[in-house]
Amino acid sequence: MTAFASHFISTCLQYSTISNTCVQQESAIANMENRNHFSLHCIQMETQLIHSNMMMLHTALLHMARVESVSASEVMSLFSLSADRTSTERC
């Protein structure tokens, strides 16, 4: 084998190694881009879900506050009624 042939084979092997490394790196970059795209898609879907249910959450909290207000006023009236009875019974 001549020196030229040996150098040519060595150069071809180096090129092949570099080429394989580049292909692996490009594949890794494409994989990361796909993951980033999917993550962004998931965040967008979660944001849409939150925005679409925001009014329903507001309505539920409003109704819950009204129920709590009514029940608190009922308890207050029962306490005042029992306080009136105990004060009249003492006299």
Image (cartoon, rainbow, N blue to C red):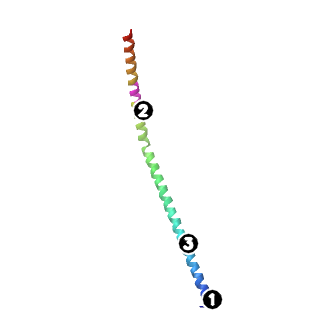
Specify the label residue 3 is tagged with. 1
Spatial separation of the CA atoms under disc 3 and disc 1: 28 Å
Q: Determine the main secondary structure of the stretch shown in magenta.
A: helix
Q: Which residue is mark 3?
A: 22
Between residue 80 and residue 91, name the one nearer to us. 91
Q: Is residue 19 above or below residue 71?
A: below
Task: Give percent across and percent down for residue 71.
Answer: 38, 27
Label 3 sits on a secondary structure element that is: helix
Residue shown at 40%/30% (left/top)? 68
Q: Quadrant of residue 90?
A: top left
* C-alpha separation, residue under disc 2 versus residue under disc 1: 90 Å
Task: Please name the residue that numbered disc 2 is placed on.
Answer: 65
On screen, residue 70 versus residue 37, left or right, reads left
| Residue 83 location (% of width, % of height) | 40, 16
**28 relative to 17, above or below:** above
What residue is shown at x 40% (from left), y 24% (from top)?
73
